C-alpha cells in the first residue's frame, strides 16, 4: 500500500502503515516519513531519539545523530528494502515519537530520564527502536527492557569496541556500560554476541566475540550460523554502534577504527539473523559533523530499517 498525499507525511499521514513518495529534499523529516505522534494506540513499533553525547571519550557530536539519521532516512523512505518480499511498514504500524527530553545541565539525572522515557513507551505495548546519541544510552535502555521482558537478556552488539572496560559505580561513559550491564545481571554474556570488535580489551567478561578479522576471514554465513547458536530463542536486545563499520563506510563517528565491516556485510548479517527473538534495538554514535556526503547518516538509517524488518519478522 502506497499512501497518496501531497507531502509532509509526518504531519498529514492518515494511515500508520505503508510507504510514501515525498521529495527527499522537502518536508518534515520524521524517521522514514512516519507520523510524528505520541499517541501509541494501535502502534507496533516506536522510533525515538536520545540526543546525548555527554559520555563520549573522543570526538563529541552524537547529540546531532538522531536528527541526521532522520534526514538520511528520507533518501530511502519511498521504497521497501531491496530484495524483500513484503515491506516491514506494511506489517507494522510504526511512528516517530520524537526525542527523549533531559536536562543537560543536570547530567546525573540523564540516565534515569532515558530509562523512564523508554519504560513509558514499551509499557504501553510497542517495541522500541532508539536513535542515538552516544552508546551510553544502551545501558538505561537495557534496564527498561529487562524490567519488561525479564533478565538476563541476550545482547547482540555490533561495534569496533567491546564497551566492557571496568568502571566505577555512577560514572557516565560510553565505553563501560556493558560492563555495568553484566555486573547488574541485565545481560548474560554467555548467551550474547559481539560482532566486529577490533580494539584490545583482554577481559571479555565471557562474551562470545566474532571480531572484525573473524568476519572478514570466515564470512557472513559463518557469523550468522555461530551467532544464532549463541542467541538461541532468548529475548535479544540489539545495539549497533555505527563505528562497527569501517571508517570508509561510516566516517561520521567519534571513535572510528580501521578494519571494520562493510555496509553490505552488516546488512547481510542482520538479514541472516532475521527470526531471532528481538525485543528492542538501537543505532548509535552517528556524529554528522565528521560525516562525508551524509554517508554515515544514510548507513545508520539503512541499518535501522533492517532492524525494523527483523522486528517485523520475529517469532
Image (spheres, rainbow, N blue to C red):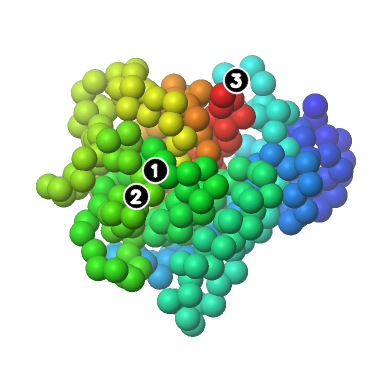
Q: Residue sitting at 50 percent across and 30 percent down?
A: 277
First in residue order: circle 2 vs circle 3: 3
| Mark 1 vs 2: CB contact within 8 A | yes
Q: Which residue is mark 3?
A: 84
Tell me: 271 left or right of 169. Answer: right
Residue 48 appears anywhere in the view: yes
How many callouts does the rendering have? Answer: 3
Cα separation, mark 1 vs mark 3, equals: 32 Å
In terms of depth relative to the viewer, which is nearer, 312 or 71?
312
Q: Which residue is mark 1?
A: 152
In terms of depth relative to the viewer, which is nearer, 258 or 135?
135
Quadrant that contains the C terminus:
top right
Q: Which residue is mark 2?
A: 185
**Residue at the far left in the pictured view:** 202
Determine the secondary structure under disc 1. loop
Image coordinates for residue 272, horizontal then vertical, percent: 44, 22
Determine the secondary structure under disc 2. loop
Image coordinates for residue 243, horizontal then vertical, percent: 35, 47
Quadrant that contains the N terminus:
top right
Residue 249 appears anywhere in the view: no
Neighbours of disc 3 within 10 Å: few (<14), some (14-19), many (20+): few
Q: Residue sitting at 47 percent across and 81 percent down?
A: 106
Image coordinates for residue 107, horizontal then vertical, percent: 44, 76
Cα separation, mark 1 vs mark 2, equals: 6 Å
* Residue 302 in the image: above or below residue 55: above
Nearer the camera: disc 1 or disc 3: 1
Determine the secondary structure under disc 3. loop
First in residue order: circle 1 vs circle 2: 1
Nearer the camera: disc 2 or disc 3: 2
Amino acid at each position: 500500500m502506497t499512501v497518496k498525499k501531497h507531502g509532509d507525511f509526518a504531519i498529514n499521514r492518515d494511515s500508520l502503515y505503508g510507504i510514501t513518495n515525498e521529495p527527499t529534499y522537502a518536508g518534515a523529516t520524521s524517521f522514514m516519513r512516519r507520523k510524528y505522534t505520541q499517541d501509541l494506540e494501535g502502534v507496533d513499533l516506536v522510533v525515538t531519539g536520545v540526543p546525548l553525547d555527554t559520555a563520549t571519550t573522543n570526538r563529541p557530536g552524537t547529540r546531532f545523530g538522531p536528527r541526521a539519521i532522520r534526514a538520511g532516512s528520507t533518501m530511502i523512505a519511498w521504497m521497501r528494502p531491496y530484495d524483500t518480499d513484503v515491506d516491514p511498514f506494511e506489517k507494522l504500524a510504526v511512528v516517530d515519537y520524537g526525542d527523549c527530553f533531559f536536562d543537560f545541565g543536570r547530567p546525573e539525572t540523564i540516565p534515569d530520564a532515558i530509562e523512564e522515557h523508554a519504560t513509558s513507551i514499551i509499557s504501553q505495548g510497542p517495541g522500541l527502536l532508539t536513535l542515538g546519541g552516544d552508546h551510553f544510552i544502551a545501558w538505561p535502555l537495557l534496564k527498561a527492557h529487562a524490567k519488561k521482558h525479564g533478565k538476563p537478556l541476550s545482547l547482540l552488539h555490533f561495534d569496533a569496541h567491546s564497551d566492557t572496560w571496568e568502571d566505577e559505580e555512577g560514572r557516565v561513559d560510553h565505553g563501560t556500560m556493558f560492563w555495568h550491564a553484566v555486573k547488574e545481571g541485565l545481560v548474560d554474556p554467555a548467551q550474547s554476541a559481539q560482532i566486529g570488535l577490533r580494539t584490545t580489551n583482554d577481559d571479555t567478561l565471557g562474551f562470545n566475540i566474532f571480531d572484525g578479522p573473524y568476519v572478514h576471514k570466515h564470512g557472513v554465513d559463518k557469523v550468522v550460523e555461530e551467532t544464532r547458536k549463541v542467541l538461541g530463542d532468548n529475548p535479544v536486545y540489539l545495539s549497533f554502534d555505527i563505528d562497527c563499520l569501517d571508517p570508509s563506510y561510516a566516517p561520521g563517528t567519534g571513535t572510528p577504527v580501521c578494519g571494520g565491516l562493510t555496509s553490505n556485510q552488516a546488512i547481510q548479517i542482520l538479514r541472516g539473523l532475521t527470526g531471532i527473538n528481538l525485543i528492542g534495538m538501537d543505532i548509535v554514535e552517528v556524529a554528522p559533523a565528521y560525516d562525508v556526503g551524509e554517508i554515515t547518516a544514510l548507513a545508520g538509517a539503512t541499518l535501522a530499517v533492517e532492524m525494523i524488518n527483523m522486528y517485523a519478522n520475529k517469532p
